[in-house]
Image (cartoon, rainbow, N blue to C red):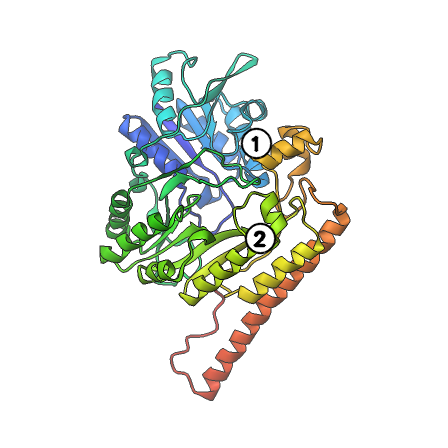
Amino acid sequence: MRVLLVVYDNGYHIPLFPQGLGYIVAVLEEEGYDVELYFQDIHHYPDDHLRTYLDENRFDVVGVSLIAGYYQYRKLLALSDAINKSKHRPTYIIGGYGPTPEPEFFLKKTQADIVVLGEGEETTRELFHALAEKNSLTDIKGIAYRDGSDVVVNPRRALIEDIDSIPMPAYHRFPMDLYRLFQDPNITNFDFMVPMMSGRGCPFKCTFCYRMDPGHRARSTESIMEEVAYLHKEFGINYFAFYDDLLMSSYERTEEVARAFLNSGLNVKWTCNGRLNWCTPELLQLMKDSGCVFINFGIESMDNQVLKNMKKGLNTDMVVKGIEATLAAGISPGLNMIFGNYGDTRATLEKAVEFLIKYDDFAQFRTIRPVTPYPGSPLYYDALRDGKLEGPEDFYENKHLNADLIAVNFTDLSDDEFYDCLTWANKTLSENYYNAGKTAIHRQIDHLYGDRDTSFRGFRHQ
């Protein structure tokens, strides 16, 4: 079979390596299928260009994968329209975090033939074998599919327990010279970056999270470092960003990964998503010594009751202690906050803004967004129960129209009061960020002309 996988355009000038599709390509290549990639993300093709491409090139299967989000949803609808209008329309498969919680809705809206639910690697093997042999889809776990005017949702497939058994993403099929130019915190013009996976899942159950597969499954450090060494040798990658849910799943796990980097002799940088529960000075120093330059923390609130309401597993004392230790170790912390959970008020938002200003090291430009009850999250089902949402169509078509606007208001504030709060918060944060930038530029000018700085290479926008 000839397979076309679509890398949709997410609006970046320099796109991020599509890690999920990289894994699927690797699986399909192992199974012997003829796989081609359509790089809308690189060429910024208009959506209807895909129709023309399918008209001019025959494929048996076309696939699109996406996460939840208003932009991705609209992009999927436009690409689906192009696929469905093509003269030789292939079997159309969608997958990813977005369609998985509400497959019936996504099959209806996109007119796709099949949804792959959850992890795709093992399901892809079985599904494509059935398609190649023209076998029934009835017994394939982990899919939903259209059967005439009906939608059939098969039982979910068990999670992949041995993460090391998943083949490495098919990096050789992607233009890594371009993808490695993506910018992340504390990256320099001499660094080349790629996202990686240290494991799957998360042991915590935050109410706003839509990635609710139970438990955490870690890759072995040997597997991780084998991939690191390959990327370093083949593509010159020296900045590794672990974008999976949580590398810092325990003290011991984090220490093991940090020591593996330290002992590799590669002298590279790395970043990860972290938990403040494990941020001791000793562990953070080890991470720093091994090349860690940024830890992205989901703090979300600086109010203990709100943290408890969202089942965050943190308290504000733990947050302050962990962030201070991270900064003391010389690692930049990603300070993520959201607003609009149960119990949020103007006072809780003020505490978040005060915290962000106090501990900002300006590695990132930070703003605060409303919490969004994405399908699959406990908050989504709360909203359905309380009549704040009528279902996935109401969410995607009426409520979640922009990530910076309210989808569902879980506070006692009116919508106008809610927006007044965010207006104040984000103006305050932006003034703090840009004032710091102005101060730095003025200091640079003083040094340039006062000290006759011959190393200066011009004023550059970073």
Q: Is residue 106 above or below residue 286?
A: above
Is 425 positioned to the left or the right of 190 in the image? Answer: right
Spot occupied by residue 124 in the image (x, y as percentages of width and height)? 37, 25
Mark toward the start of the polypeptide (1 vs 2)? 1
Question: How crowded is the residue under tag 1: few (<14 C-alpha within 10 Å), some, or many (20+)?
Answer: some
User: Closer to the camera, 263 or 440?
Assistant: 263
User: Closer to the camera, 415 or 136?
Assistant: 415
Amino acid type at mark 1: Leu
What is the number of the mark on residue 77? 1
Which of the 4 image quadrants contains residue 134? top left
Q: Can residue 88 be seen at all in this image of the molecule? A: no
Name the residue rendered at 54%, 78% in the picture.
442
Q: Name the residue under label 2.
A: 337
Disc number lying in front (1 or 2): 2
Is 187 positioned to the left or the right of 312 in the image? Answer: left
Q: Can residue 383 be seen at all in this image of the molecule? A: yes
